[in-house]
Image (cartoon, rainbow, N blue to C red):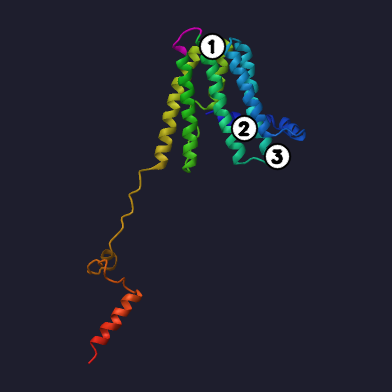
Amino acid sequence: MLDGRLRNGVQQGLTPIGAGLRRIGVTANLLTVLGLMASIVTAVLIGTGNLIWGVVGLVVSGLLDVLDGTVARGSGNAGPRGSFFDSVADRVSDALLLGGVAWYLAAESAYLPILAFAVAALGATISYERAKAESLGLTAKGGLMERAERMILLGVGLAFGVLVPVLWIMLVLSAFTVGQRFIMVWRQAGPPREPRRIRHRREVTGEDSPRRRWWEPRPGSSRARRERTRAGRRTRP
Protein backbone atom coordinates (compact mmCIF):
# COMPACT_ATOMS: atom_id res chain seq x y z
CA MET A 1 0.00 0.00 0.00
CA LEU A 2 2.76 2.44 0.98
CA ASP A 3 5.57 0.60 -0.79
CA GLY A 4 5.36 2.36 -4.16
CA ARG A 5 4.51 5.86 -2.91
CA LEU A 6 6.90 5.81 0.03
CA ARG A 7 9.75 4.35 -2.00
CA ASN A 8 9.29 6.90 -4.81
CA GLY A 9 9.30 9.80 -2.36
CA VAL A 10 12.42 8.57 -0.57
CA GLN A 11 14.17 7.89 -3.89
CA GLN A 12 13.54 11.46 -5.05
CA GLY A 13 14.96 12.81 -1.80
CA LEU A 14 18.03 10.59 -2.07
CA THR A 15 18.72 11.41 -5.73
CA PRO A 16 21.57 13.88 -4.92
CA ILE A 17 23.20 11.31 -2.63
CA GLY A 18 22.89 8.68 -5.35
CA ALA A 19 24.53 11.02 -7.87
CA GLY A 20 27.42 11.61 -5.46
CA LEU A 21 27.89 7.89 -4.92
CA ARG A 22 28.00 7.29 -8.68
CA ARG A 23 30.69 9.94 -9.07
CA ILE A 24 32.98 8.20 -6.58
CA GLY A 25 32.43 4.83 -8.28
CA VAL A 26 29.96 3.15 -5.92
CA THR A 27 27.82 0.64 -7.83
CA ALA A 28 24.28 -0.52 -7.18
CA ASN A 29 25.42 -4.10 -6.56
CA LEU A 30 27.86 -2.91 -3.92
CA LEU A 31 25.05 -1.07 -2.13
CA THR A 32 22.91 -4.22 -2.28
CA VAL A 33 25.73 -6.20 -0.65
CA LEU A 34 26.19 -3.51 2.02
CA GLY A 35 22.45 -3.55 2.71
CA LEU A 36 22.56 -7.32 3.14
CA MET A 37 25.49 -7.00 5.54
CA ALA A 38 23.60 -4.33 7.48
CA SER A 39 20.67 -6.75 7.80
CA ILE A 40 22.99 -9.42 9.22
CA VAL A 41 24.33 -6.99 11.83
CA THR A 42 20.80 -5.79 12.62
CA ALA A 43 19.59 -9.36 13.12
CA VAL A 44 22.42 -9.99 15.59
CA LEU A 45 21.65 -6.76 17.45
CA ILE A 46 17.97 -7.67 17.76
CA GLY A 47 18.73 -11.24 18.78
CA THR A 48 21.07 -10.10 21.56
CA GLY A 49 18.51 -7.63 22.95
CA ASN A 50 19.92 -4.36 21.59
CA LEU A 51 16.55 -3.29 20.21
CA ILE A 52 17.25 0.44 19.82
CA TRP A 53 20.42 -0.28 17.86
CA GLY A 54 18.33 -2.76 15.93
CA VAL A 55 16.04 0.12 14.89
CA VAL A 56 19.10 2.07 13.71
CA GLY A 57 20.28 -0.93 11.70
CA LEU A 58 16.82 -1.35 10.23
CA VAL A 59 16.86 2.25 9.00
CA VAL A 60 20.36 1.88 7.55
CA SER A 61 19.51 -1.34 5.68
CA GLY A 62 16.32 0.27 4.36
CA LEU A 63 18.17 3.35 3.08
CA LEU A 64 20.77 1.20 1.36
CA ASP A 65 17.98 -0.81 -0.26
CA VAL A 66 16.49 2.37 -1.71
CA LEU A 67 19.86 3.82 -2.72
CA ASP A 68 20.86 0.81 -4.82
CA GLY A 69 17.85 1.36 -7.07
CA THR A 70 18.56 5.10 -7.28
CA VAL A 71 22.18 4.51 -8.29
CA ALA A 72 21.21 1.83 -10.84
CA ARG A 73 18.66 4.05 -12.58
CA GLY A 74 20.88 7.12 -12.48
CA SER A 75 23.81 5.27 -14.05
CA GLY A 76 21.64 3.72 -16.77
CA ASN A 77 22.76 0.22 -15.73
CA ALA A 78 19.41 -0.97 -14.38
CA GLY A 79 18.65 -4.37 -15.86
CA PRO A 80 17.36 -7.88 -15.15
CA ARG A 81 20.54 -9.00 -13.40
CA GLY A 82 20.51 -6.15 -10.88
CA SER A 83 16.77 -6.46 -10.34
CA PHE A 84 17.11 -10.20 -9.67
CA PHE A 85 19.99 -9.65 -7.24
CA ASP A 86 18.09 -6.93 -5.38
CA SER A 87 14.92 -9.06 -5.07
CA VAL A 88 16.84 -12.07 -3.74
CA ALA A 89 18.72 -9.83 -1.29
CA ASP A 90 15.42 -8.38 -0.03
CA ARG A 91 14.02 -11.85 0.66
CA VAL A 92 17.21 -12.90 2.49
CA SER A 93 17.19 -9.64 4.45
CA ASP A 94 13.58 -10.18 5.57
CA ALA A 95 14.40 -13.71 6.71
CA LEU A 96 17.45 -12.50 8.63
CA LEU A 97 15.60 -9.72 10.44
CA LEU A 98 12.69 -11.91 11.50
CA GLY A 99 15.18 -14.63 12.41
CA GLY A 100 16.79 -12.13 14.77
CA VAL A 101 13.36 -11.39 16.23
CA ALA A 102 12.74 -15.13 16.75
CA TRP A 103 16.14 -15.42 18.47
CA TYR A 104 15.23 -12.57 20.83
CA LEU A 105 11.76 -13.98 21.60
CA ALA A 106 13.14 -17.45 22.31
CA ALA A 107 14.37 -16.13 25.68
CA GLU A 108 10.76 -15.28 26.64
CA SER A 109 8.89 -18.32 25.37
CA ALA A 110 9.49 -21.44 23.32
CA TYR A 111 6.39 -20.67 21.23
CA LEU A 112 6.87 -16.99 20.35
CA PRO A 113 9.60 -17.66 17.74
CA ILE A 114 6.94 -19.55 15.74
CA LEU A 115 5.04 -16.25 15.47
CA ALA A 116 8.05 -14.55 13.90
CA PHE A 117 8.58 -17.44 11.49
CA ALA A 118 4.88 -17.34 10.50
CA VAL A 119 5.19 -13.63 9.67
CA ALA A 120 8.32 -14.37 7.61
CA ALA A 121 6.54 -17.17 5.71
CA LEU A 122 3.56 -14.96 4.86
CA GLY A 123 5.86 -12.14 3.79
CA ALA A 124 7.67 -14.51 1.43
CA THR A 125 4.30 -15.68 0.06
CA ILE A 126 3.26 -12.10 -0.65
CA SER A 127 6.44 -11.50 -2.62
CA TYR A 128 6.10 -14.83 -4.44
CA GLU A 129 2.56 -14.02 -5.55
CA ARG A 130 3.75 -10.84 -7.21
CA ALA A 131 6.75 -12.53 -8.85
CA LYS A 132 4.66 -15.43 -10.20
CA ALA A 133 1.94 -13.10 -11.46
CA GLU A 134 4.46 -10.94 -13.32
CA SER A 135 6.03 -14.04 -14.88
CA LEU A 136 2.56 -14.84 -16.29
CA GLY A 137 2.09 -11.32 -17.65
CA LEU A 138 -0.30 -10.34 -14.83
CA THR A 139 0.01 -7.91 -11.93
CA ALA A 140 -0.22 -8.42 -8.17
CA LYS A 141 0.92 -5.12 -6.71
CA GLY A 142 -0.63 -3.50 -3.68
CA GLY A 143 -2.19 -4.83 -0.53
CA LEU A 144 -2.28 -3.81 3.11
CA MET A 145 1.05 -5.36 4.09
CA GLU A 146 3.83 -4.85 1.55
CA ARG A 147 7.51 -4.77 2.46
CA ALA A 148 7.54 -1.10 3.47
CA GLU A 149 4.67 -1.62 5.91
CA ARG A 150 6.35 -4.70 7.38
CA MET A 151 9.61 -2.85 8.02
CA ILE A 152 7.83 0.19 9.51
CA LEU A 153 5.76 -1.93 11.89
CA LEU A 154 8.81 -3.97 12.86
CA GLY A 155 10.67 -0.74 13.67
CA VAL A 156 7.75 0.48 15.80
CA GLY A 157 7.67 -2.81 17.69
CA LEU A 158 11.40 -2.65 18.37
CA ALA A 159 11.45 1.04 19.35
CA PHE A 160 8.50 0.95 21.77
CA GLY A 161 8.92 -2.54 23.21
CA VAL A 162 5.64 -3.86 21.79
CA LEU A 163 7.18 -6.48 19.56
CA VAL A 164 4.74 -9.33 20.23
CA PRO A 165 1.53 -7.29 19.63
CA VAL A 166 3.06 -5.83 16.48
CA LEU A 167 3.93 -9.30 15.22
CA TRP A 168 0.32 -10.41 15.70
CA ILE A 169 -0.85 -7.36 13.72
CA MET A 170 1.67 -8.17 10.99
CA LEU A 171 0.50 -11.78 10.92
CA VAL A 172 -3.18 -10.88 10.45
CA LEU A 173 -2.54 -8.15 7.86
CA SER A 174 -0.05 -10.31 5.96
CA ALA A 175 -2.56 -13.17 5.76
CA PHE A 176 -5.17 -10.69 4.49
CA THR A 177 -2.71 -9.39 1.86
CA VAL A 178 -2.01 -12.94 0.67
CA GLY A 179 -5.74 -13.36 0.10
CA GLN A 180 -5.98 -9.96 -1.62
CA ARG A 181 -3.26 -10.76 -4.13
CA PHE A 182 -4.55 -14.26 -4.74
CA ILE A 183 -8.01 -12.95 -5.65
CA MET A 184 -6.47 -10.21 -7.80
CA VAL A 185 -4.44 -12.67 -9.88
CA TRP A 186 -7.27 -15.23 -10.00
CA ARG A 187 -9.61 -12.67 -11.53
CA GLN A 188 -7.04 -11.53 -14.08
CA ALA A 189 -6.21 -15.06 -15.15
CA GLY A 190 -9.84 -15.93 -15.96
CA PRO A 191 -11.23 -19.43 -16.49
CA PRO A 192 -8.99 -22.03 -18.19
CA ARG A 193 -9.30 -22.25 -21.95
CA GLU A 194 -10.84 -25.34 -23.47
CA PRO A 195 -8.29 -27.49 -25.32
CA ARG A 196 -8.48 -27.18 -29.07
CA ARG A 197 -10.24 -30.24 -30.52
CA ILE A 198 -8.59 -31.78 -33.57
CA ARG A 199 -11.33 -32.30 -36.12
CA HIS A 200 -11.45 -35.28 -38.44
CA ARG A 201 -10.89 -34.72 -42.17
CA ARG A 202 -14.48 -35.47 -43.05
CA GLU A 203 -15.65 -32.72 -40.64
CA VAL A 204 -13.51 -30.19 -42.53
CA THR A 205 -14.05 -31.28 -46.14
CA GLY A 206 -17.41 -32.96 -45.83
CA GLU A 207 -16.06 -36.06 -47.56
CA ASP A 208 -17.48 -39.37 -46.44
CA SER A 209 -14.42 -41.40 -47.27
CA PRO A 210 -13.04 -44.16 -45.04
CA ARG A 211 -9.76 -43.67 -43.21
CA ARG A 212 -6.69 -44.65 -45.20
CA ARG A 213 -5.20 -48.02 -44.28
CA TRP A 214 -1.52 -48.36 -43.56
CA TRP A 215 -0.84 -50.29 -46.79
CA GLU A 216 -2.62 -47.74 -48.99
CA PRO A 217 -0.48 -45.00 -50.60
CA ARG A 218 -0.80 -41.44 -49.34
CA PRO A 219 -2.89 -39.27 -51.75
CA GLY A 220 -0.64 -37.20 -54.01
CA SER A 221 2.45 -39.33 -53.36
CA SER A 222 4.62 -40.77 -56.15
CA ARG A 223 3.40 -44.28 -55.31
CA ALA A 224 -0.24 -43.18 -55.76
CA ARG A 225 0.58 -41.63 -59.15
CA ARG A 226 2.34 -44.79 -60.30
CA GLU A 227 -0.64 -46.93 -59.30
CA ARG A 228 -3.04 -44.63 -61.17
CA THR A 229 -0.83 -44.88 -64.26
CA ARG A 230 -0.75 -48.69 -64.11
CA ALA A 231 -4.50 -48.83 -63.59
CA GLY A 232 -5.04 -46.60 -66.63
CA ARG A 233 -2.89 -48.84 -68.78
CA ARG A 234 -4.83 -51.92 -67.74
CA THR A 235 -8.18 -50.31 -68.72
CA ARG A 236 -7.03 -49.29 -72.24
CA PRO A 237 -8.64 -51.36 -75.13
Q: Earlier in the sequence, mark 3 or mark 2?
A: 2
Distance from Cα at disc 1 to Cα at disc 3? 40 Å
Amino acid carrying label 3: it is Ser
Residue designated by label 1: 104
Estimate the x, y position of residue 85 in percent, counting from the top left: 59, 34
In front of the other: label 1 or label 3? 1
The kind of residue tagged 2 is Asn
At 65% from the left edge and 28% from the top edge, which residue is drawn?
33
Check residue 109 for magenta coloring.
Answer: yes
Looking at the picture, does residue 219 appear above or below residue 80? below
Figure quadrant of residue 40: top right
Q: Which residues are magenta?
A: 107-112
Q: Are marks 3 and 2 in contact (CB under 8 Å)?
A: no
In terms of depth relative to the viewer, which is nearer, 83 or 170?
83
Residue 82, by quadrant, is top right
Residue drawn at x 48%, y 32% as measured from the top left: 128
Q: Nearer the viewer, mark 1 or mark 2?
A: 1
Q: Which mark is residue 8?
A: 2
x 54%, y 26%: residue: 147
